[in-house]
Every structure is written in structure tokens, then in C-alpha cells.
Image (cartoon, helix red, strand yellow):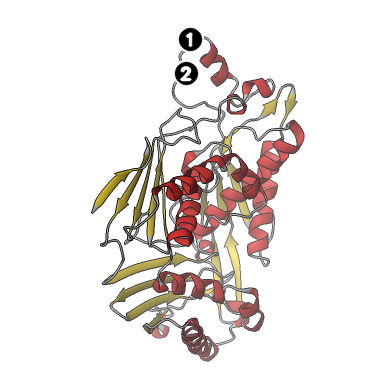
Amino acid sequence: MKIEAIDENIFLVKSKTYKVNTFEIVERKGIGHPDTLADALAEELSRVYSKYTLSRFGAILHHNFDKLGLLGGESFVTFGEGYLTKPIRVLLNGRASICFGREKIPVRELLEEATRNFLVKHFPNIDKEKDIKIQYNLSTSSSPGRVVGAGIEEEVRTYMFRPRGLHDLKELVFLGANDTSIGCSFAPLTPTEKIVLDVERYLNSTSYKKHNSWIGSDIKVLACRVGKNLDMTICIPQIANYVPNLHEYTNNLEQTREDILGFIKELGFELKATLHINTKDNPEKGNLYLTAIGSSIESGDEGLVGRGNRINGLITPCRPMAIEGVCGKNPVYHVGKLYNIVAQEIAKKLYELTNSEVEVYVISQNGRALQDPWKVIVALKKNKINSKDIRTVITDELQRIPKIKYLLLKGKIPLC
């Protein structure tokens, strides 16, 4: 292993032992999993709030919804019929500016309407009012650091969530890191990682559901590869309204098994795949993954921001992973969001440049300039790499940080 300092804060690690060789464990929680739903909803609320304040006041005001939670309701399910008996509960946790100058911002109305629209879009069979219960818990308290009577900093924190004008948004003058945190990523994806990601997307695709209306969205894929043997456990919910009996339920899973194996074969990887589907099923005891709306959020399961997929769509314990909940964070200066996005972009670009497996770590320091991280560490397998080219890729991506917010507002960067 060789470590090279290619700049004051940028370090290159060259090692031949990088590659994941012997085994892998890879997971993806599908789009209807409660944790994935919580992530996606938090990010949707950030987009809605950001667009409103940007269009009305010329700037994205302070906010974060990354502590949002979804609490499961209850449902009645039998073959041929399913419906909610108790509502899905949403904990709208976080902080947001509630006014700009003398103008009040309808924060509660904005977020609650966006929440109901989001859940109905994902689950068209639920009632927008009756099946959703929202608990509004937003705060306007500033972060630690305010000392009463200290002067300018006191002014900034006093008006952090009640700005009198653009002059109270210090990030417009100095774009600084809001926290001490870590962003990390890697490239490329291994065949196992691609299979796990693509299988869930295939099953949850519009084209697949067009011919399989019974399939729910809370699909979970967990793969363990040892050598060339790929074992996959997949949980696939069925929607009761489209499943008249046990025979149909069983046939659906068997057909889907064949579909998945065929799909994996078409991907062309030299791995021997074995599938285990709905391993908890026990028809004799009435245990089946039969649902009213296609997600465990209907029956007591809970979802929290940051407990699901990383921004590459996967959970990869054998690879670099940060535990930050990126969704719902302010897209202007929250390093827990921006540095993970930047790390992923740097990893992709360096892989394209070097054709070498790469890991990237971007580390912030609270209060430091956002485009000047405290440390950047790049680990590459290949040794013959031009350090100048690496530095250029890193600095270019760091300089693009202010533009990331616009891509996020357009939904151009998937985060879960």
C-alpha cells in the first residue's frame, strides 16, 4: 500500500487489495419499503419547500426534514379484498423558516398537502384524508452555538428561521459546511450489486406491473455471493384485490421466479443464481405476504429517514458506507447530503478516467468553506495514475457544489 499527498488536503491511496473478491452481501429496499418511502417523502418535502421559497423570495430558506418518520397503520386482508382499517401516520419532524420579512410562509399547508399527494401517488387505492394521519412537529430552534449578547452571530441565529431579508442568509455571502461529517462512495458496481439493484427496479417497473397488477412495491432483495454462487432472498408482496385464492398466489410467485431468473441470465454475468422467495410464507398457518396496498407500511411497520438505501440505491456492508440520512436535508449547504453526492460523482469520473476500482471519502469541518473539504481521500487499485488528473477531477466536482441544488430540485439526482 502506498499513500501520496497530491495536495494539502487530498490524499491518494494505492492498493492492490481493494477489490471485493471472495464474498459480498448486498441489499436493496424497494420503493415501497417504509424506510425508502420515508427517504423519498423527506426529499419531496425539501423540494416543495425549496421551490416555494426560491420562487417567492429568491433564495432557498433554512430547513431540514431528515428526521421524518412513517408509522404503519392497520389493514384487513383476505383473498380478493384488502383495505386499511387504521391510517398511516406521518411524523413531520424537522425545522423550517416560517416567514420572510413580514410575509408568513404556509409551511404546514405546503408540507401536509405534499405528503398526502406523495402517498396517494404511491398507493392510489388509499383515501387522501381518511387513510393518512399527519402529526406536525416542526421546530424553529437554531443549532447550538448561540451566545446571548455576543453580537453578529447572535443576530444570525436569532433570525435563522425568521429571516428579515436576504442579508440574514449568511450562506449567500459565505457558503460554509453546516456540520462535521463524512461523504463516501465507490465505483464501479460489482455484478452482484448491479443484479440486486436491477432486479428490484425490474419488478417495480411500470412495464412489469402492467402485466402483473398483483405485485406490491415493498420488494426487498438481499444477496449473498460466495465465489461465483449468488444466493438471493427476495420478499415480494401481493395485493389482495388481485389475488382471488391461494392457487393464484402460488402461481404468481412461481411465474415471478422464472421471470427473475430469466432477467438475471440476460444481464450476462457469470454467476450461478439461487432464489429464495417469501421464505416466511406458511399457508397452513395463514402466513402469506398478502397486503391491502402492497407495503408493510399498512400493517404496523415503520420507516425512518436514513435507515434504508444509500444514494447509489444499495446497502453494501462490505463497501464504504456513510450513515447519514441524506434525504430531506437542505440542498444548499448540508454536507451530509452534498458530500455524499460529490463523493459519488468523483468516484464515477475517476473510474471513467482510470478504469480502476475506486473509493472516495470527502470529510467536512463545521464552518469550513463547503468547496474546500477538510480532507479528501481517494483509494485506487492501479498504481500508474496521473496525480494531476485526479486533482483536477476532485477540484472540478467540488466547484460544482453550488449547482447541485438545482439538479436536486429538478429530481435529476436519485437519492434512495
Q: Identify which residue is drawn at 38% across, 58% down.
A: 358
Mark 2 closeness class: few <14, some 14–19, many ≥20 residues within 10 Å: some
Amino acid at dot 1? Ala
**Cβ–Cβ below 8 Å for labels 1 and 2?**
yes
Callout count:
2
Residue holding disc 2: 146
Nearer to the camera, 178 or 49: 178
Nearer to the camera, 35 or 412: 412
Which quadrant of the figure has residue 190?
bottom left
Q: Identify which residue is drawn at 34% across, 58% down.
A: 384
Residue 353 position in % (x across, y down): 47, 59
Amino acid at dot 2? Arg
Image vertical order of residue 244 relative to residue 302, above or below:
below
Residue holding disc 1: 150
> Horizontally, is 383 left or right of 164 in the view?
left
> Horizontally, is 94 left or right of 269 in the view?
right
